[in-house]
Every structure is written in structure tokens, then in C-alpha cells.
Amino acid sequence: MRLFTAVLPPPGVLTELEAAVDRLKGLPDADRLRWARPEGWHFTLAFLGEVDEALLPELRERLARAAHRHPAFGLRLAGGGRFGDRVLWIGVEGDHTTLRRLADSVTAAVRRAGVPTEDRPYKPHLTVARAGRTAHRVDLRPFVASLDGFSGSDWQAREVALVRSFLPSSGVPGEHPRYETLEAWSLDG
């Protein structure tokens, strides 16, 4: 099964973000982007990819231990950015140190459970849109500029979620991945 670990923003915060993203959809070329759905918005801590179900018991145990070592901490969605001309994302303000430590701890737990993970510096972001695979690229800079003043409400990250990802399989254009939280552990360190 295809898995990742994440911090999930609360519903009220997602509602604020949804209003900001809806305004972006009025910009030129917005119809050429694949917009992520609010129910799928998250901050990935570690991407696991395909994981053998036999590894799940140890993975769950190690993730629980990692989560319990960290306290809940404050965050706020703010601003935006892009990864080249492919991904438009929302940024985060608040306790970056604890978020980064949590991501490092979760990644170490995943590896100790025998699951390989990506080895790259952690860059906290929440993906809101992706450019399609067309020959004509979308200039994401106007979208990022429109997010310059965005700042959501403060919220507390209180848990780590293990999420299963179901990739689109019907071949229907515009189909989105579906996410299912398998388990979540409180941050109570």
C-alpha cells in the first residue's frame, strides 16, 4: 500500500485556505492547473511510497513512539511558493524547529521499521496545485504573488497521521488521489 506520514491542519484552517485558493482560480491559466482538494491538504512529514503490509505493525509502533516524544506546537498557514513551474504551495509560519524535528524523528522511525524514505532536506509546504504535463508551461509566479498577503489563523499541530494514498486509476481526466488516515498518534511529549 502507498503511504505517507503527515500533519493535518484542522477544518477551520482549511476553510480559510479554501477561500484563498478559490480566488487563485480566477487568475489567467488557472484552468490549466490540477487543483488539490481541501480534504487532501496536508503537510507531509515523510513519504513512504509502497509499503509491504507485513511492516505495518512495527511501523505503527515506531511512529507512535516518535509522536509521543514531541509536544503539540503552533503553526499558521501563510504565503505561498512554487517548486519550479510544476507545484504551487502554501507556506507555514510558527514553530518551524519543532516541525522539522518531528519530520526528522518520523523519518528515522520509518527507516528503523525497514521502510526506505526520500533523503532530502525537509521543506514544509502544503501543495494546492500542480501544473499539467503539457508542452506549454504555466507561469506560477502570479499565483505565488497573489498569496503574498495570505495569513491564516494560528492552530496547534496535535498529532501525526499515517495516511494511505489511492492514486487515480480510472483514467478520467481531473480525477484526484484519495487519502485515508489509517491511524494517528498524539503529540504529547
Image (spheres, grey):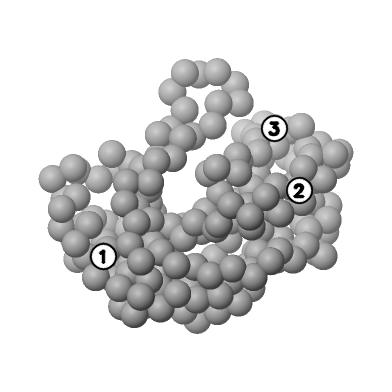
Asked if residue 141 lies left or right of residue 71, the reply is: right
Asked if residue 177 lies left or right of residue 160, the reply is: right
Q: Amino acid at mark 2?
A: Ala
- Residue under circle 3? 135
Image vertical order of residue 132 relative to residue 62, above or below:
above
* Disc with the residue nearer the chain's start (2 vs 3): 2
- Residue under circle 1? 64
- Residue under circle 2? 19
Q: Amino acid at mark 1?
A: Ala
Image vertical order of residue 30 relative to residue 84, above or below:
above
Residue 3 place in picture, x, y as percent: 34, 47
How far is disc 2 from disc 3 in space, using C-alphas?
Answer: 30 Å
Look at 49% across and 34% down and name the residue there.
177
Look at 55% across and 18% down and name the residue there.
172
Q: Amino acid at mark 3?
A: Ala
Asked if residue 149 lies left or right of residue 108, the reply is: right
**Crowding at label 2, few (<14), some or many (≥20) Cα neighbours within 10 Å?**
few
Q: Quadrant of the N terminus?
A: top left
